[in-house]
Image (cartoon, grey):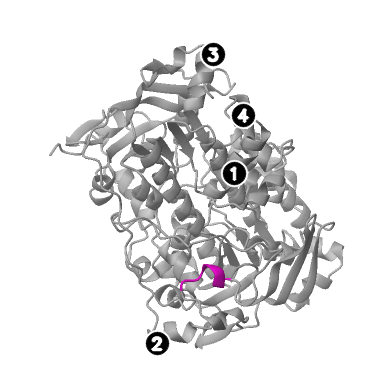
Amino acid sequence: MLNFMSHSQATTSVAAAEAVVWPATAPLLQVENLAVEFETSRGRIRPVDDISYTIWPGETLAIVGESGCGKSVSSLAIMRLLPKTTAKVVGGRVRFEGRDLLALPEAEMRKVRGREISMIFQEPMTSLNPVLTIGLQIMEPLRIHLGMSEAAAQKRATELLSLVGITDARRRLAQYPHELSGGMRQRVMIAIGLACDPKLIIADEPTTALDVTIQAQILELMKDLSRRLNIALVLITHNLGIVARYADRINVMYAGRVTEQGDASRVFAAPRHPYTIGLLRSVPRLDQPRTSRLETIDGLPPNLLELPSGCRFAPRCAYRIPLCDTEPGLMETVPGQWSRCHRASALETGELSIVAPPRALPAASAQLAPEPLLSIRHLSKYFDVGRRGAVARAVDDVSFDVGRGETVGLVGESGCGKTTVGRTILRLAEATAGEIIFNGQDVRRAHRGELQALRRQMQVIFQDPMSSLNPRMTIGDIIGEPLAVHRLEADRSACRARVQLLLEQVGLPGYMATRYPHQLSGGQRQRVGIARALALQPSFIVCDEAVSALDVSIQAQVINLLERLQRELGLTYLFIAHDLAVVRHIADRVVVMYLGRIMEVATRDDLYDRPAHPYTRALLAAAPVPDPETERRRPSGLLQGELPSPLAPPSGCVFHTRCPMASEACRNEVPPLRELRPGHYAACIKLEVE
């Protein structure tokens, strides 16, 4: 049984771990020509079509691709968790330590799941039982698979929660999933996945809802465990920075097939498939200033009911030739790298350029300090947790402005109060103290009629699309509902036409209007939430992790869409996110929060190029860059120490318990937000005014 390391041991840098080489034994997992079919109301589709790959003990394999390409379905097939009524494995084998998992009796497969192979799912709210406490759900596999006593299982569960960065772990065991934030629920899922020391972990977007520091800590932990104990890791993600930092090999999937695979460093340095090239171009870079619009891949992934003949990527490919009307095989371009492209050799020889011309940005506005549309002054939100008057200070004395037509990014670790600020602005949660002035109107004092009118102008894109979409309504009805409530369309025909237009704007085909939320992937559901927010043509949108669940190509399309709508309609955004690269691209100014308080405020480029506060510097160091060579040169930069509980925040500066610059004065004095240089503010007594 694994004895978990201390936090400092667990955060060993990847550079050090790279020195460990997994033994040349037999492969742990071999997927051979796997094919999966689904029966739908429109016909039969094959979301996974003849894919093969091998995983060795201690290896990390990343699977990337657009939403709906088959990444998650292939992993569910390995675990035999596909819905039996609509899905069927129609070809291939899955060998795990020599055993064909697809042929195992169900009773034997249940012993494999959780004990030898664990899976961390993308959406924790749909994977955690809402009527059971967190503690019971973590203890269940420990008692079933490891035979632990209740006391031993409870002790291990507490240890696991602390390991994944959840403070006050013993108290959290008694809470229910709805009492935790999205990021904390995801950490609970990761704790369950690690519980029984499995030989293989399949992580399906394991850090989508996590901020960069916890993401780095958890992925460093998983990578370190993988190397030390020969645990294989399949990492399904759309974050190419994570792939660059942690993956040994990479599979790129498109429309159910593997289009490119090979050593991660080689694929990043010299991609040999146009689709891989398009993905890499779409990624915003944390380490580079914003000089052009994000590149996107034109068009949409094909409808699996009407697949194109020949190469499935050909309709969207800039390098298409007549030969692409025939199906290419997966060919080895150089030793250890394969590509499913007729023009791979032209890319190899340099006949085709992989460098895209920059897409110029629209001319910047000369207005440096726009008139505030939203002003927040001394905003506080405290929650009564029902323990003898115990209070959680989710937001504590926060003040900032959002200019008309401006995008303000709000960043910080999970639980820092970002989402609570957004919900309080919208009056989805009532503020404890402070002022919220929107377009000259006091939001806190607005009565019911005024609030309804305000909410037409103030919309929100929620973090968790599954919990914000009505499961009994079709996608068309969900998007059309606000149009009907506010009577913005003359009849149903006009409403349907408007819904079709909104679906196209967010990169979804029109036929999605007839589907239900559970029939869509996580990324597709997030796009539905964006379409619904745009329906009323608001002037202000709170984007709460609006693009966190999207793959990089669709993410680039949505970011460009949000920017275009902002220019055309004069929209204003409060952009809440943990992806610092996305924030650098889209935001005009950035507000950094920690444990309910503001640490730093500055313009985008000033904050990223000259971060002042130690916390901001730690956030930037923890964020991965989509370049393996750059990642090897960067220090680990993990933020040390545990995030304090908002039930008992530290005295003085709330960051002093984790700050390398902290002094005795920091423990006793609450630092004010001071202007260090024009437009750049920081709450740190150790920093000098320039």
Residue at left offset 48%, top offset 41%: 414
- Taking depth in this image into account, of 183 and 487 the one nearest to the observer is 487
- The quadrant in which residue 291 appears is bottom left
Q: Earlier in the sequence, mark 4 or mark 1?
A: 4
Callout in the foreground (4, 1): 4
Say whether marks 4 and 2 touch (CB < 8 Å). Answer: no
The kind of residue tagged 4 is Ala
What residue is drawn where x is 50% and y is 31%?
Answer: 459
Boundaries of the magenta span: 313-318
Pick out the residue farthest to the left.
690
Label 3 to label 2: alpha-carbon separation? 66 Å
The vertical placement of 281 against 100, above or below, is above
- Under mark 3, the amino acid is Gly
> How far across and how far down the image is residue 641, in percent?
41, 46
* Amino acid on which the number 2 mark rests in the picture: Thr
Q: Which residue is labeled 2 in the image?
A: 349
